[in-house]
Every structure is written in C-alpha cells, then in structure tokens.
Amino acid sequence: MWLEASRIMLQLRSLQKVRCGILTVEIEHVDADTLEKLEQRGVDCEPKASTIRIIQDKYSQKVHFSRHGIPLPEFMQIDDLESANRAGELFGYPLMIKSKRLAYDGRGNAVAKSPEVLSSAVTALGGYERGLYVEKWAPFIKELAVIVARGRDGSILCYPVVETIHKDNICHIVKAPADVPWKVRKLATEVAREAVSSLEGAGVFAVELFLTEDGQILLNEVAPRPHNSGHHTIESCYTSQFEQHLRAVVGLPLGDPSMKTPAAIMYNMLGEDEGERGFQLAHQLIRRALSIPGAAVHWYDKPEMRKQRKMGHITIIGPSMGIVEARLNAMLTEESLESQTAVQPRVGIIMGSDSDLPVMKEAAKILNMFNVPYEVRIVSAHRTPDVMFKYAKSASERGVQIIIAGAGGAAHLPGMIASLTPLPVIGVPVRASVMDGLDSLLSIVQMPRGVPVATVAVNNATNAGLLAVRMLGVADVDLQARMSQYQEGTRDEVVAKAEKLEQVGWESYSNS
Amino acid sequence: MWLEASRIMLQLRSLQKVRCGILTVEIEHVDADTLEKLEQRGVDCEPKASTIRIIQDKYSQKVHFSRHGIPLPEFMQIDDLESANRAGELFGYPLMIKSKRLAYDGRGNAVAKSPEVLSSAVTALGGYERGLYVEKWAPFIKELAVIVARGRDGSILCYPVVETIHKDNICHIVKAPADVPWKVRKLATEVAREAVSSLEGAGVFAVELFLTEDGQILLNEVAPRPHNSGHHTIESCYTSQFEQHLRAVVGLPLGDPSMKTPAAIMYNMLGEDEGERGFQLAHQLIRRALSIPGAAVHWYDKPEMRKQRKMGHITIIGPSMGIVEARLNAMLTEESLESQTAVQPRVGIIMGSDSDLPVMKEAAKILNMFNVPYEVRIVSAHRTPDVMFKYAKSASERGVQIIIAGAGGAAHLPGMIASLTPLPVIGVPVRASVMDGLDSLLSIVQMPRGVPVATVAVNNATNAGLLAVRMLGVADVDLQARMSQYQEGTRDEVVAKAEKLEQVGWESYSNS
C-alpha cells in the first residue's frame, strides 16, 4: 500500500514537471489519504479520492449506496460473536461474511451455513479485528454487470449488460450481452447508472449486480476502474473500456459504448496448475484458441503461474451467441472445430410433413448456392405440437437466425412458430389437395396484428430461400453483393432467351 | 539503406542471442543483398529475400508477374529518349513513366501527356540513369486492393476487396468492402491470390489492382508487408493485418480475415499545412472524430508536420456503408453530427398513394416504438415509375436496409421494388375498393421464382413494421431482446383480458 502511495508521489512529481495534472488509478486498493493530500495540492484525481475511499471499504460502500436508495442485499457490521449471531438470527442461513477491505476474487469472503460454523468462518477471514460485516444471502439466479462511463462534464454512458459466470468465486466467463429479458437489461442499466451517479469524479466504473428469481436487481459492488467484466469490449464494442476510461478522465467526449458485433464471450485463463505444468496447459489452450474464428488471445505474461491466478483471457466474438458458444466449446474440448461449428445452422427449414419436402427442398438448394448453413426438420403443428414448441423456443439460442416454415391446408406451422420466437419466420404455403393452395396461403398470410409471417407465393420455396438470404444480407455485405450478382444472373438468362427468340423466331423457339 | 542493413545486422545478433531465428521487414526498401547473406547464414527471413528483391524494383516486379501470367498493364523499360519515344508510339499518350526503385505515395511517378513533354517528365524523375520504365495508361474506373496472408505452411487467406481512393497519387480513403459487383470481387481476389502465390515466403502482402471499365482486373503492384489499404482491419476484421503478419511469419495458424462489421472507411490524415498550422488543423479533425460514433483515431506522433505527409489515420466503422459515409461527411464538415446522421433511415416505408397512408402509418408507429429510424415516401409503380426505379436502386447505398411497400388493387409496387434491389422487401396488401383486398394480396404474394416479397396480411402494416424489426434483430441482439419483450407484453395484455373476462363474466365484459 505504501509502495503504491510512493509510486503515486513519484508519478505526481513527473506529472507536475510535464505540466499534466490528471491522476487516475488502475486499482482501488491505494492509500486514499495520499490521494486526498494530492487533491488538496491541486492534483486533479479522476475519479475523486472520496470515491476511492468509499469503494475500498466494502462496508462503507454499502452504507453509501443504501443511503442513495440503490437496491442491495441487507447487510450489517459485526464486531463480535454476539453481533454475528444476531445477524444470523436476523438474516438467516447461509450467511455471507465479508471483510471490509482488500477483498476481491473470492478472497475476503466466507459463507457460514449454520450458526455452529460462524466462529470458524470468522477466523478464516482473520478475525473481527480485520473489520467484518455480513450480508443477507441473495438468492440470485444470475450475476450481471454493467460498465458505466462518466465524463468530466457529468455525461454518462452505459455499456450493454453482461452476465458474469463465477467459478469458486472467481470470474470465469462473461457473456455479452446477457441473455435476460429486455426489461431486466433496462432495470440493471438504470440501477448501475444511479449507483455511479452517486459517486464523484470521471472514469469508467464496473457495477456488479444480482438478478433475483422475481426479477429484482440488487447491487453487489462497484469497482472505480476498467474491470474484468468489460475486457470483451476491446474486440466487441465501438469503444473499449480502456479507451473510454482515458476519454473520461482526460475530458474528451465519451465514445460509443454499443457492441459492434452481435455477441461476445470473455473466458478467463485461470492457472490450472502450479509452475511448468500450468504453463503447458495454458499454452495448449492458446494453441486451440488461435484456430478459433473470432477468438483473440490476451496473455498477461505474468512471471509466476499459480492455481486460479488470472494469467490472461480470451475473447470470442461472432454473429450470434449460439455461434460464439459453439466456438467456446470447440476451444475447450479436444474435438475438432469442424465437428463443432461447421454445422452451426443459420436458417432452419421446417415443414409439417415429409410430403412437403419436394416443395421445400428448393429453399435448401438456394441456401446451398449461397453457402448459408441450414438444417431441415419435420415439425408438425398438429401432430407434434410439443416438438414444434421446443423447436421454436430453442432456435434462437442454438444460433438459428431465420426460420422457413412450409405447410399446406389449414397451415398453422409458420404462424405458431412466429408466435413462439422473436426470429423472422418465412411462410411457404404448400399446395394441398384442394383450392390450388389458396387455403394454405390465407392460413399463413392472414396473421393477426402482433405476429408477422413473411409469406411467399404458393409452392415457391425458392423465393423463401432467397428472402432468407436477403434478410441475412442486411448485416452481411458479402451476401448482399452475391444477391445482386444472382439478380444480374437471372436477368442475363432472360436476356439470352429474348435474343434467341429474336434470332430463331417464335415458331422454332416453341419447338426447340 | 545501409543504416537499415546495419540495423538488421544488429537485430540479428540479438536474435541469435535469444535463439530466435525469424526476420521480417516493415518496408521493402531494405538491402536485399544483406537479407540474402543472412539467409545463407541460416536466418529465416519471411517473406524471403528473393521476394523483397523482386518487389523493390518495380520493373523486375512487372517482369516477374507478367511471366506468371498475372494480368497487368503493358510496360517496357526505357534507357534513352529513343526508347521512350518508341514506347510512346506503342502505348500512346498519356504515358505513365515510373522509376524502378524507391517509388511510393506518388513519388517516382510522372505522367507525360504528349511526346513533347517526355523529356521534361524524365528529367523530373531524375533521368534515365535512375532506372525508368513506362506503363501503358490503364483506363481504370476504380482502384482496388486485397490484403493476402500466406502462412509458413503455404496456406493463403484473403481479406475482403477494398476500394482505395487516391488524391494527388496518395492514398486518401479506403472503403471496405469495395462497392463493386460480386464477380469483380471474386476476380480481384483470384488475381491477388495468384500474384502472392508466385512469391516466396510467409507474411501479409498488399496487392493493388486496377478495375477497368470492361470489368477487367489488372495488377498495379504488390507490397510484401502490412499496408495502408489494410489499416481498417484493426477495427473492422476479426484479425487485424498486423496480427495476421505475425501469425504468418511465426508459423501460427492464420486468423479469420473476414469483417466483423458490415462496413468501414479508413481516412488518411495527410498534412494540410506545414508546421504549427498543420498540427492545428489535424487536431481540429481529431476533435471532431472523437465525437463520431464508430470512429477510431490513430495519430502516429511524427515529430514534423509536412504537407501531404501521412500523420495518422481515422477508421470509421458502422452497420452499413451508407451510415459510415454519413459519419465521414459529418467528420469532414463543420455541420453537427446530428444533422448528418441522426436522420439516416434504416427502413424505407413507401406506398403507391397518399390514400394508403392511414394503413401504412401503423408500420411507422411500430418503428417509432422500437426506435428504428425510417423514412416515409410516396412512390407509385404506375404513375411515377422513374421515381420508383431511382428509389429502389439508391436505397441500399443510402443506408436503407429494409423496404416496406404498400399498394392496393393491381399492387405492383412491392414486387417491382424487390426486382430492383437486393434488400428484403416487405409487401403490405392494402384493401382497395373491390374483393376485400384479395386482389392486392395475390398481386403482391404470387411473385415469380427469383424475386421474393415478404407479404403480410391485408391492411396489416403493424405486422410489416414488426417483421422489419425482427429482420434487423437478426444482427442486433438488443432489438431481438426488445422483440421478445414486446411479445411478452402482448401476451400479458391477453392474459389480463382473460382474467377480466373470468372475473366479470362475458355479459358485463361485452358491455364494458
């Protein structure tokens, strides 16, 4: 700690020499007294020393946020066994015991499952004299985090809400964006913004949150700096959290925090073993990562390898969370990448019965032509409603981006699928035995307000395939260029026929 | 040059000390003899000294590629006025005169517009003794470039074809991907791949190409290293050209070269004036760039500012070329960003007549709800076919990503638009005076094979808006999450109604 402070003093002297007066911190465990002295001498600390002081003591952090009306788990200070027992009676068990200071990556936290083990848990943390408090157990279903940037002018921008997945209390995986309903994302962003608004100074702040079963968002803690939960932003966002922090403290306009790729997963490389063996395992992982499309390896080059130590991280980005997850799995297993990701379908072609296949296969032919991966399934709205339900609900998370559904007669499949998924659904009316397919067409196209089905002509699965390619082309300039080329090709075909007709005359043409 | 060579020797000694034997170059203007000597002593140069030797002499480069069957403009060496005049007679004027060595950024190039100025052009280049050759004027319509990576195992991956726009012979703007037909992109990629295949060694190569009016691709020149035309890859591709070069020369698997964002523009910051005034202008530009979403500033921190000197570059990325171009314009003009980009519509809502507006406005309401920018236009297939043609053809390059077209009766608008654009087109059959809209529906949905229209129910523009949001959600997880939320919302509405019905009974319900 004192070493830190003297480092700051040294930096300060050189700062004053070069006439630069902004000081920021890369970790909150610095001496707040020194920071305050520096502020008194006119050094511009961002964020403010007061913020560092509040945050480095987790108990005072809770008191601060609680006073500002930020929702968080109930908590109380404990000074001896008596107050600890009282807390246990009040909050129930399991009971979370935490040290006020220098707690991170699971260090400084202990769980007492019953009153009997309270004392031993306290001892494990270093005793009451270290400064302890307890927290009511938050029955969360997910841990979320939001990186919030505040400029010197007070402007605030929030990064997308991410899900953090911990293993042995250490952040293991971060998924961006979090797979939670929109209203949860909105609520999490609001809580994070409120929390940061209550603190002084510019910079990037990481707000860690709990999502409870009943959809509540509770604050866990705030870090006043770029954070592990924001490392994915280097590759996935328009502005990385590190550039954002510099922009914020220096007084430049804040950069766009939104994602430039649809999905990202950050995987922490934690030491799996001590010493050489640990390095070997890490290098094996890096070697696999180098073959994964969209994976970026960050190796911190720490001299010593220890179990559970953060040695680096790997960020994988891609066009959908399903695809990114498949890439992560390929990286973490010995299986070849091909077997894991090559088959990742982007379009699902489904039909009510195998009798629809002669019509529906034309959609598959188009997707083949454009190299778009797809899957073909028989899913009947009336005969296998369970399968249909499951298919529609899981499609998006499996990486499917568009569903083409064909059906005939009382053709319910496309509309039912559309009501069960947020993905665009293309409906192909298949001509059944009567009415030349008009029954199928009207069953598919005349959907009620709220649930659209993109309907194509009767039996025209070719156009369904082409429509899917056009939809994917919205975000894929290559596909769009190839669609233009296809249109030019069909035009050339017609032109050739027209020329032939002119050359040979209509009589020979009809006979040829 | 010799300084370079001695630097290489120095580096080599330290390389041998640390038992690392790979040498690469950041610029081809190094002493090839020294490189060859190093190779003979066992140093692994990537790319090979032979490649550097071929490339650093532009004439021998042309001879090399010509021998390997790569298409390129005709050329010949000139040693005196006589051979220069002969070349002029053979190739015609204007005639491109180039020095064989140390030519880049327009230096070492001169154009003789007629035989009379041949001598003065040669003198301007330093005379025949410097080593000159002439090239037949290539009447190109665009300059393209392809970054090609070759691994140590010979594997080759190509980055997307870009368009390079030069100003006074210096690269000014790079657009990725190039706005050229798919078959041109394919051809350019093939020529680039062939050119690099003819050279020895691993690394990243930049292949500069001409696109002629008749769709031919001619090789201009190759640089055996990361290149200005590939700077955009830092922000826009899964693997930047710099990482790719390291992967290639070191023998790691090559990374995915494809774009992670749909569009990018790289803008070179060329010195606009000498000294302090030049710095001031550059800083004004940087300040504006910092407020542009998706813009990344790279300032090279060169100590001296000179007119036309490359002082840095700015890369702007975004969801479509239209949007990125609007951002570039906002950066280069004094106008506020809002006036330039806030109105950039992603969806075009068009209709044949203002009588369709009461129906079609429901699509706009949905897009409002989801914060999707759109435009509303009256475009009639039968009364303003020219306007329709122009609208459809320009939509994509203006940044429009989806078109919603409404029409009634003999409803031709959606189908005609779909035949003129590669964008997805959503058709809304508007109920006209007869047949309850069945005429409109069939006119829109029964499209021939090859031209799909995503048709929704009669008069149901709400569903057209929702379908557009679902399509945009394919590459925008936020929109997709909000669509799920919307679906949940409509479900809750129905549930509430059902509960009310149960509570009050059907008789009171009907009256309420």
Image (cartoon, coloured by chain):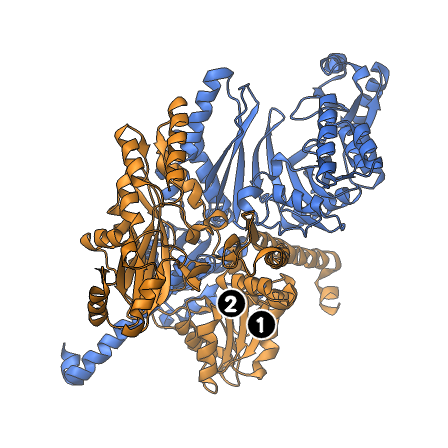
Chain colours: A orange, B blue
Classify 10 Å Cα crowding around label 1: few (below 14), some (14-19), many (20 and above). Answer: some
- Residue A230 visible? The answer is yes
- On residue B511, the disc is none
Label 2 vs label 1: CA separation? 9 Å
Point out the residue furthest to the bottom here: A383
Specify the amino acid type for callout 1. Glu
Tell me the element at label 1: strand
Q: Is residue A387 above or below residue B284?
A: below
Q: Position of residue A190 (x, y in %)?
A: 28, 54
| Direction from residue A207 to residue B253 in the image, left or right | right
The answer to which of marks 2 and 1 sits earlier in the sequence is 1
Q: Position of residue B302 (x, y in %)?
A: 54, 24
Quadrant (top left/top right/bottom left/bottom right) for the C terminus of chain A: bottom right
Specify the amino acid type for callout 2. Val
The front one of A362 and B103 is: B103
Q: Chain of mark 2?
A: A
Tell me the element at label 2: loop
Q: Chain of mark 1?
A: A
Q: Which residue is mark 2?
A: A400
**2 and 1 marks in contact (CB < 8 Å):** yes
* Residue located at (21% from left, 72% from top): A89
Q: Which residue is mark 1?
A: A375
